[in-house]
Image (tube, rainbow, N blue to C red):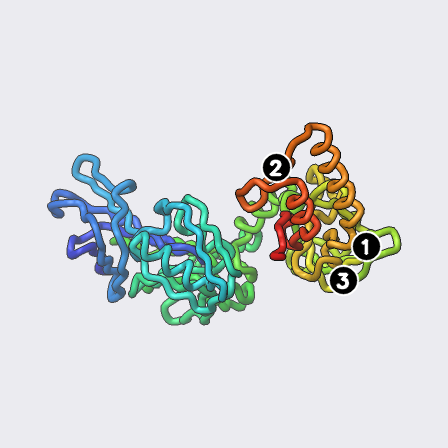
């Protein structure tokens, strides 16, 4: 019989579940007639010669009569814990390793980002499960070290001397396996009866009767079930049309509409022609949008028949459709005339206007307005230094 123990306390059976992405979970059963207590806190799980480091989850552990169960989560067991909202900012750029490392430390985990990526100048972490910072990335908790590895698992062929394939379900891509050794995701099953299959998720039970594993396989980075559920949510929820998509301007037609190229081909949206622009404020109009300028496209009412450009990023003032000082000349002249008329009508020594938190006479306010421009990134009005 395979040796099964948690912190030196002998277990009658252990069920180990390892997902392709996420922390491993083990449910260890005990007989309280021979074991004095249910393990708590940091846990050392022994399965044969293998040693796994985890933490007992008190919310899923307990006893009933003379039987007890302890649920052990790989590593510090902290990725499901709630973290507060936090803003990460660095003008040089925020890297994923910094966000993941800081979040891991908050919940008692240790993490290594195998391939850090630049997230941008800002990263806004929302309040919620700590694992949100790992969304969209493959990650797993190593069995022996308890360290979270952010990156894909290595794929290795199964040892034919220790892994016996008992059954294969081609529809579910599910294999039944007999093995006294721990079978992990990334193991490649090779069998003349069905070919090859890569294990993505695996559940393995160890007991006095031996060890059996159920492995869900796929050539994609998720099991077929996960793929079907994701497709169901995407199709029924029309999630593709509920978020803005980044595009790059290729050309602008004589009617002002834009020909665009999708920045991320994997986003699922096509390159587009003759898309209208919905400007952020009344009266704004773009005379020329420079090719290469990035913009955001949304689907109004979540309808694929109503795409529209709603904002721009980068480029110069003309490229982003911003009114310049020259184009504001008529507007400024009208404001100055109106301010003078108000002053004459009310016989005020000066009509006050607020600029920089101080009151100014009408003439000074008009002079300040004459040196006003619109910033291309946020359309806010600011006064130039005179």
Percent x, y of residue 74:
32, 56
What crowding class fits label 2: few (fewer than 14 Cα within 10 Å), some (14-19), or many (20 or more)?
some
Q: Is residue 43 toward the left or the right of residue 166 in the image? A: left
Residue highlighted by disc 3 = 290
Mark nearest the camera among 1 and 2 is 2
Lower sequence index among marks 2 and 3 = 3
Extreme residue in the top direction: 346
SS of the residue at dot 3? loop
Residue highlighted by disc 2 = 352
Front position in the image: 365 or 37: 365
Percent x, y of residue 6:
20, 54
Front position in the image: 195 or 115: 115
Q: CA distance from mark 1 to mark 2?
A: 34 Å
Q: Residue at x 45, y 50 (%)?
A: 125
Lower sequence index among marks 1 and 2 = 1
SS of the residue at dot 1? loop
Percent x, y of residue 338:
75, 36
Q: Which mark is residue 287?
A: 1
Q: Is residue 225 toward the left or the right of residue 127 in the image? A: right
SS of the residue at dot 2? loop
């Amino acid at each position: 019989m395979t040796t099964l123990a948690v912190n030196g306390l002998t277990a009658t059976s252990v069920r180990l579940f390892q997902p392709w992405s996420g922390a491993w979970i083990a449910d260890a059963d005990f007989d309280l007639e021979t074991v004095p207590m249910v393990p708590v806190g940091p846990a050392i799980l022994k399965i044969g010669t293998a040693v796994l480091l985890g933490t007992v989850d008190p919310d899923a552990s307990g006893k009933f009569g003379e039987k007890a169960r302890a649920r052990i989560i790989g590593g510090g067991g902290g990725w499901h814990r709630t973290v507060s909202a936090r803003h990460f900012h660095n003008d040089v750029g925020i890297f994923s390793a910094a966000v993941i490392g800081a979040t891991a430390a908050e919940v008692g985990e240790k993490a290594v980002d195998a391939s850090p990526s630049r997230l941008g100048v800002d990263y806004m972490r929302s309040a919620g499960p700590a694992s949100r910072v790992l969304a969209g990335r493959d990650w797993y908790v190593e069995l022996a070290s308890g360290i979270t590895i952010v990156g894909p698992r290595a794929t290795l062929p199964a040892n034919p001397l220790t892994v016996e394939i008992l059954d294969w379900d081609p529809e579910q891509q599910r294999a039944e396996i007999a093995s006294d050794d721990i079978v992990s995701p990334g193991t490649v099953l090779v069998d003349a009866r069905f070919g090859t299959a890569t294990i993505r998720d695996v559940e393995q039970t160890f007991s006095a009767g031996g060890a059996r594993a159920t492995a869900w396989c796929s050539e994609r980075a998720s099991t077929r079930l996960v793929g079907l559920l994701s497709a169901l949510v995407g199709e029924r929820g029309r999630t593709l049309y509920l978020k803005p998509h980044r595009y790059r301007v290729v050309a602008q037609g004589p009617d002002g509409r834009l020909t665009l190229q999708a920045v991320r081909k994997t986003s699922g949206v096509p390159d587009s022609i003759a898309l209208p622009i919905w400007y952020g404020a009344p009266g704004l109009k773009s005379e020329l949008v420079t090719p290469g300028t990035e913009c955001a496209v949304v689907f109004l009412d979540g309808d694929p028949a109503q795409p529209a450009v709603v904002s721009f990023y980068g480029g110069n003032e003309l490229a982003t459709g911003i009114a310049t000082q020259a184009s504001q000349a008529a507007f400024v002249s009208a404001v100055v005339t109106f301010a003078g008329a108000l002053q004459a009508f009310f016989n005020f020594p000066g009509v006050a206007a607020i600029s920089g938190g101080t009151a100014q006479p009408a003439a000074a306010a008009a002079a300040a307005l004459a040196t006003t421009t619109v910033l291309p990134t946020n359309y806010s009005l600011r006064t130039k230094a005179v």
